[in-house]
């Protein structure tokens, strides 16, 4: 179906829904690289105006990737909850924006319609929103998950402690874990990106993390971010896997480039559920996403990268994950050119994921060849704190020496917690206070002591 719009005495025709979505997207280098971006600000504004007038129901009748050839499209349509959609079925995209921004719509109303929303619907409404709109609506959404602690509560901010090492050296990893714990980091997960996918090395890291968490009775969970098939093998061999990780994307072809499919993810979900290692809940999957991944695999089907990203969230919510993380600036300037584009993309991703009911976190990051710096990341960090992000990354000095990119530090989390009066996960905070890492007011204590790590020989083994 073609869409027509007149603006500034110019006639614009957008031949189908995916073209309209692409032309309406705020400027980003990936869409320019794909040759699908608007060619002028006027064309973009015309597309946004046409998009605002489009009924939400249209998204159920025209798909951006064909149902017959893409299992993600089939998942989106087959899992759509018509009953949840009913309260908003009469709205246009523009009306839906107004509905979300209205004072009367709270988390309660959003939760009721969440399963009736498709990724394309939330992607569309994000394209006609200002930065403050994205922040306000995301802040309304409260998506709580549990494993060994409770994540996503209002007034709380968790962190993934990311103790990567270029050689998977146990002592180096342990030193980073110690550093992070003493700054109150690690309640979302202690998660290692291994330097190798060798099963034997992965097994050692899994046992190391389990040993640390068990020995110090830390109310958190661990994850080694290796390929999902390696984790399935580990579970089948009775390794102590807490939560299963996988990078995912928004099209079947893009997921195939990661070596995964819905059937493989189903197998992993079933396997990790069989372990039943959660003490408070059983949200036990961890997904990472990022704008541009489908395009980089030539698997985007001429769909804009932000809509492809939102479609990945349909895959994620199938598995009721503990954590979903957009690694927003990691893929590089070919897809998000500068700090302005990274910031907008991060807020879009967070908004779309939250609206779809996901426990969204953000790797607030950039690569060294992007036109971005730490000031840009501080802006996005602060905006996401206001938007109610569930978790961020915690890295020693904000510099990941294994993955070679810049992200957020242990101190950045302390900044948001202090300025916005946010706390770690309640069970984790209790542990921090018990061991005098935090004082009774929930503030960082004098760091001259090592808390429970006075004898650190166990941690460094």
Image (cartoon, helix red, strand yellow):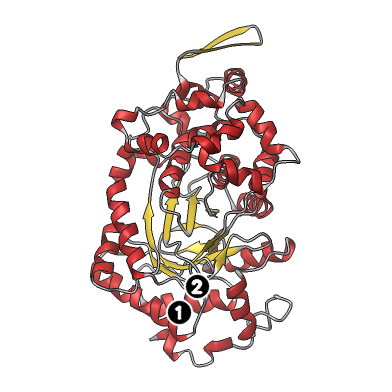
Identify the mark nearer the N-term, 1 or 2: 1
Q: Residue 392 at what x, y percent from top left?
A: 56, 59
Residue sitting nearer the eye, 205 or 357: 357
Task: Using the rendered view, name the quadrant where residue 67 is placed.
Answer: top left
User: In this rendering, is residue 446 above or below 408?
Assistant: below
Q: Secondary structure at mark 2?
A: loop
For the residue labelled by badge 1, is the local secondary structure a helix, a strand or a loop? helix
| Residue 166 drawn above or below residue 126 | below
Residue furthest out toward the right? 103
x and y percentages locating residue 214 in the rendered image: 44, 82
CA gap, disc 1 and disc 2: 7 Å
| Residue carrying label 1 | 213
Labelled disc at residue 220 = 2
Quarter holding the N terminus is: top left
Decide if residue 430 is on the left or right side of residue 115: right
- Coordinates of residue 76 in the picture (x, y in percent): 41, 37
Q: In the image, what residue occupies the spot 34% across and 64% down?
A: 272
Q: Quadrant of residue 66?
A: top left
Q: Give the farthest residue toward the bottom.
A: 455
Marks 1 and 2 close (CB-CB < 8 Å): yes
Q: Is residue 258 in sight in this rendering?
A: no
- 371 lies left or right of 69: right
Residue 338 appears in the figure: yes
Residue 317 sits above or below residue 226 on the image? above
Which mark identifies residue 195?
none
Q: Position of residue 167 (x, y in %)?
A: 34, 70
- Judging depth in this view, the residue of 281 and 341 nearest the camera is 281
């Amino acid at each position: 179906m073609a869409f027509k719009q007149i603006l500034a005495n110019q006639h614009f025709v957008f031949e189908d829904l995916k073209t309209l979505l692409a032309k309406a997207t705020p400027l980003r280098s990936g869409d320019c690289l794909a040759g699908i971006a608007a060619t002028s600000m006027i064309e973009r504004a015309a597309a946004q105006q046409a998009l605002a007038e489009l009924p939400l129901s249209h998204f159920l009748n025209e798909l951006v990737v064909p149902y017959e050839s893409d299992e993600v499209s089939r998942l989106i349509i087959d899992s759509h909850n018509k009953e949840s959609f009913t309260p908003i079925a009469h709205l246009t995209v523009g009306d839906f924006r107004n509905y979300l921004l209205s004072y009367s719509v709270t988390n309660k109303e959003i939760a009721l319609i969440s399963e009736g929303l498709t990724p394309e619907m939330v992607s569309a409404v994000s394209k006609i929103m200002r930065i403050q709109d994205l922040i306000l609506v995301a802040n309304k959404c409260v998506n709580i998950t549990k494993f060994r602690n409770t994540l996503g509560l209002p007034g709380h901010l968790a962190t993934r402690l990311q103790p990567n090492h270029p050689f998977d050296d146990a002592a180096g990893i342990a030193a980073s874990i110690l550093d992070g714990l003493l700054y109150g980091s690690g309640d979302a997960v202690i998660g290692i990106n291994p330097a190798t996918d060798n099963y034997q090395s992965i097994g050692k890291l899994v046992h190391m993390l389990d040993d640390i968490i068990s020995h110090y009775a830390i109310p958190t969970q661990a994850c080694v971010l290796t390929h999902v098939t390696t984790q399935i093998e580990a579970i089948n061999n009775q390794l102590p896997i807490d939560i299963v990780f996988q990078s995912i994307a928004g099209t079947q072809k893009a997921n195939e480039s990661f070596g995964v499919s819905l059937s493989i993810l189903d197998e992993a979900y079933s396997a990790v559920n069989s372990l039943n290692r959660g003490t408070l809940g059983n949200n036990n999957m961890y997904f990472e996403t990022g704008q541009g991944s489908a395009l980089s695999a030539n698997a985007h089907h001429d769909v804009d990268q932000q809509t492809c990203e939102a479609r990945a969230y349909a895959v994620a919510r199938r598995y009721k994950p503990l954590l979903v993380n957009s690694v927003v600036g990691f893929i590089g300037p070919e897809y998000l050119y500068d700090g302005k584009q990274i910031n907008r993309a991060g807020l879009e991703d967070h908004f779309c994921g939250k609206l779809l009911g996901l426990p969204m976190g953000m790797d607030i990051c950039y690569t060294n060849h992007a036109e971005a710096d730490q000031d840009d990341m501080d802006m996005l960090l602060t905006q996401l704190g206001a938007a109610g992000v569930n978790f961020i990354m915690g890295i020693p000095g904000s510099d990941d020496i294994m993955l070679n990119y810049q992200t957020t530090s242990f101190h950045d989390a302390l900044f948001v917690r202090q300025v916005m009066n946010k706390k770690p996960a309640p069970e984790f905070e209790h542990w921090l206070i018990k061991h005098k890492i935090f004082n009774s007011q929930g503030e960082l204590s004098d760091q001259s002591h090592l808390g429970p790590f006075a004898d650190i020989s166990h941690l460094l083994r």
